[in-house]
Image (tube, rainbow, N blue to C red):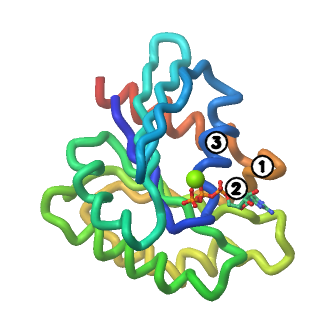
Amino acid sequence: MEISLIGLQNAGKTSLVNAVAAGLDCEDMIPIVGFNMRKLTKGKVAIKLWVLGGQSRFRSMWERYCRGVSAIVYVVDVADHDNIYISQRELHYLLSKPTLSGIHLLVLGNKIDKVEALSKKGLTYQMELKSLTGREVCCFMISCKNLTNIDQVINWLVKHSKSKS
Ligand SMILES: Nc1nc2c(ncn2[C@@H]2O[C@H](COP(=O)(O)OP(=O)(O)OP(=O)(O)O)[C@@H](O)[C@H]2O)c(=O)[nH]1
Ligand SMILES: [Mg+2]
């Protein structure tokens, strides 16, 4: 199964892949300008993870690499109050594409170790997650730095790979 991992620059995508990969078997990243691909396996479960660049010049590629995936994982820096609106806008814009209808979404509020981090309620509100209907939407609050709730992310990925294959 394939999963796309997206989010604005500096959200923590690379840190998340490294944290998740530490709990799974993984092959090396294949770096290409704008994105990386990484294969993760846990037992019989194999996950192909597309990690897409977050800078504005790469965001037009997001839709192409989200088409046909089993799930989209969207990372948000919950301590970066200046960029949360942009993150919200980009997520809603992406999910408005008909090609991506129904694809499961996992929103990760990252950097909860920081004092200025939003709460889960605050993130849900700021990202307008309640208005995302017609698909499964799940949200966890994590810290890639302290490895908080990374096990929940791994369980979610493994569960969603099983339900599809
Ligand atoms: N305090 C804290 N810092 C974090 C956490 N996760 C990532 N960071 C830091 O945030 C910065 C950006 O993390 P990256 O993983 O490189 O972010 P990215 O989303 O891959 O960024 P791009 O590749 O530029 O799109 C780095 O300095 C990380 O060390 C976290 O949970 N807590
Ligand atoms: Mg990165």
Ligand 1 lies in which image quarter? bottom right
Q: Is mark 1 within 8 Å of ligand 1?
A: yes
Q: Is mark 2 within 8 Å of ligand 1?
A: yes
Instruction: Specify the amino acid type for callout 3.
Output: Gln
Element carrying mark 2: loop
Q: Nearer the viewer, residue 23 or 17?
A: 17
Alpha carbon distance from label 1 to label 2: 5 Å
> From this viewpoint, which residue is outermost toward the top?
44
Q: Is mark 3 within 8 Å of ligand 1?
A: no
Residue of label 3: 152
Residue at left offset 60%, top offset 41%: 17
Residue of label 1: 148
Q: Earlier in the sequence, mark 1 or mark 2?
A: 2
> From this viewpoint, which residue is outermost toward the left?
98
Determine which quarter of the picture holds residue 82: bottom right
Q: Are marks 1 and 2 in contact (CB under 8 Å)?
A: yes
Q: Residues within 10 Å of mark 1 (few under 14, many from 20)?
A: some
Residue of label 2: 142
Instruction: Specify the amino acid type for callout 1.
Output: Thr
Q: Residues within 10 Å of mark 2 (few under 14, many from 20)?
A: many
